[in-house]
Image (cartoon, helix red, strand yellow):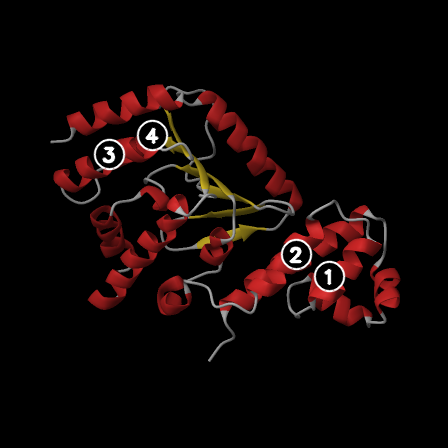
Amino acid sequence: MPPPLKNSVAQRRVGLELRRLRSEAGRTLSDVATAMEWSIAKLSRVENGEGPILGRDVRFLCDMLDAEPGVADALVELVRQARTPGWWEPYRNVLGNNYIPFEASATEVHEFQLELICGLLQTPPYTRAIMRQSAREDTEDQLEQRVELRQQRQAALRRGDKPLRLWTVLSEGALLRQVGSPDIMQAQLLHLVDQSERPNIDVQILPFTATERPPMGTTFMILHFEAGDPLVFSGGISSVHEVEEPRDQRRALVAFDRLRAAAASPEDSRRIIMEAAKAVS
């Protein structure tokens, strides 16, 4: 039995933030390891998310590295979360990658989709139609688990007093590419309009005529958190990969800002989606 995903996710985020703090403080691995009375190998494992860390050690490190106010509290909360099973654990056999656990702890998601409606705004029939094409080797039970998993992700958009903030830019092609039957597609587009009216969700359509366009085939997601740098993921229907190169991460952040500046406004986008829904036959 592999270790719970919750550990790798929480530890990875703690490690990334501690590495950032050390770098900004101008301290070497040797400096910090000596102050902690750790080996360099142990500190390296912590920063790589490969080893656990105690809450009191996180506070000591944050103090040593002059962390911003609130960072220590946020990281200690992540340490606590590492001991708490995530809601996604029952779906491990169809999870596929670590993107969803990271998304579950994000405060804001920025997403660009070229061909499909983003997963957080999909209806079950639309998701099911996609999965029948992309996961053909799955049993019917596994397919339904994938559909249920996607619906569970959407609960974050409705959680308590701090719902997930979603800003998605969709290529116009995502509205015109029929997935499933006409009825499924029309219902999906109407659902998209309805969800776009929620205060924590912005949907913008990038028209075919827009001059600002990403490379063909590009789909990417940017996850923002209460503390630490954002994480960038890129991928397709069946796989999502973390973008680890800092230069490529910066390019994704700039690209999203340019795309939403070039896209139709949220109000105009709703009209575009409604027209697409009416045109489905």
Q: Earlier in the sequence, mark 1 or mark 2?
A: 1
Circle on res. 58: 1
Q: Closest to the observer: 176 or 200?
A: 200
Q: Secondary structure at mark 1?
A: helix
In this rendering, would 90 be left or right of 148?
Answer: right
Q: Secondary structure at mark 3?
A: helix
Residue 177 pos. (x, y %)? 25, 36
Question: Would you name the residue on which mark 4 appears?
Answer: 197
Q: Closest to the observer: 133 or 268?
A: 268
Q: Residue at x 70, y 61 (%)?
A: 47
Q: Give the spatial CA distance, label 1 vs label 3.
A: 46 Å
Q: Closest to the observer: 18 or 162?
A: 162
- Asked if residue 74 can be seen in this view, the reply is yes
Residue 218 pos. (x, y %)? 45, 39
Q: Earlier in the sequence, mark 4 or mark 2?
A: 2
Residue 55 pos. (x, y %)? 69, 65
Q: Residue at x 17, y 42 (%)?
A: 184
Q: Give the spatial CA distance, label 1 vs label 2.
A: 7 Å
Question: Crowding at label 2, few (<14), some or many (≥20) Cα neighbours within 10 Å?
Answer: many
Circle on res. 189: 3
Q: Image quarter for residue 190?
A: top left
Q: Earlier in the sequence, mark 1 or mark 3?
A: 1
In this rendering, would 113 be left or right of 133?
Answer: right
